[in-house]
Amino acid sequence: MRCRRGDFNQCRDSQLLGLEKDGLFSGIADVPESVTHNINDHLTGSNLPVLSCLEPAAVAYLACQNARVKGADTVVVFGAGPIGLYSAIAAGRVFGASKIYIVDPVPFRRQFAAEWCDRCFDVPEFFESPPSEIDVVIESSGILQNLTTVFHRINANGRAILLGRCGHPLMIDSPDHMITNAISVMGSRGHLGGAFNDLLTLYLNGKFPLEAPVTKIISGLEQLKHHLLNHEMVLNENCKVLVRLDGGE
């Protein structure tokens, strides 16, 4: 019933292609028309990999919508993986945040993300000298202690968005600060409800660089296996790795 009310992300009968339902790597997948997007008019040989990034970009876009990011906001993003980087890009390029800071422990990812924010911090560096003003926190790393530690620095009417899943409890030890300053904490799930259409329009008008997090495109199952077995290489030397299974380059 929730999806029939327009809350598409909250459908209790949804099935994820490739997890609950077979078909992720098939040449043809049978899915309901209501969840498809016609991208035929936008396909070229060069932007097919880019369009495969719509899903994580839309997750970040929806998170910024839920965080009500606006002009003059200072936004802190924990995690410089694909969704964290897209969150920083959306916050600045689409929603007009005035200051964007990214926090990540991996040197390569900090260097790679520097183009899309005002400053990238290592984790200890950030907590030793955090920004004096924080309006929005987007936690995409799954390290919930980040939010616990920074929570008392969030401004009045601030917003904190949880994206990274980890299975650990969230501890907020500043409830008085939360109550006094009317700070909102919420989770943001998925991308449905219009984000794809918005992002396609932004991308086609040169307003949103879907290609930004892509650091490598590999080809074939053997390369995919190699990267899955060497996940530290993906973490420490890449942001987003795409896989071609059609033998193309």
Image (spheres, helix red, strand yellow):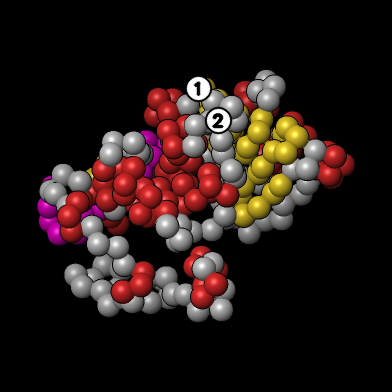
Which of the two residues, 25 or 236, is positioned nearer the viewer here?
25
| Circle 1: element type | loop
Name the amino acid, label 2.
Gly
Which of the two residues, 87 or 237, is positioned nearer the viewer here?
87
Please tell me in which quadrant of the rendered image residue 121 appears.
top right
Question: For mark 1, does the 10 Å Cα neighbourhood hold few (<14), some (14 to 19), or many (20 or more) residues?
Answer: some
Residue 150 disc label: none
In the rendered image, residue 235, in percent from the top left (x then y), is placed at 42, 41
Residue under the image location 12 percent in, 48 percent down: 45
Q: Is residue 242 visible?
A: no
Question: For mark 2, does the 10 Å Cα neighbourhood hold few (<14), some (14 to 19), or many (20 or more) residues?
Answer: few
Which of the two residues, 71 or 244, is positioned nearer the viewer here?
71
Q: In the picture shown, does residue 17 fall above or below 92?
A: below
Residue under the image location 52 percent in, 22 percent down: 119
Q: Are marks 1 and 2 in contact (CB under 8 Å)?
A: no
- Kindly report which numbered mark, 1 or 2, lies closer to the viewer in this rendering: 2
Residue under the image location 49 percent in, 37 percent down: 95
Please tell me in which quadrant of the rendered image residue 216 appears.
top left
On the image, numbered disc 2 is attached to which residue? Answer: 71
On the image, numbered disc 1 is attached to which residue? Answer: 118
Q: Look at the image and give the residue range highlighted in magenta.
A: 235-249
Which of the two residues, 61 or 71, is positioned nearer the viewer here?
71
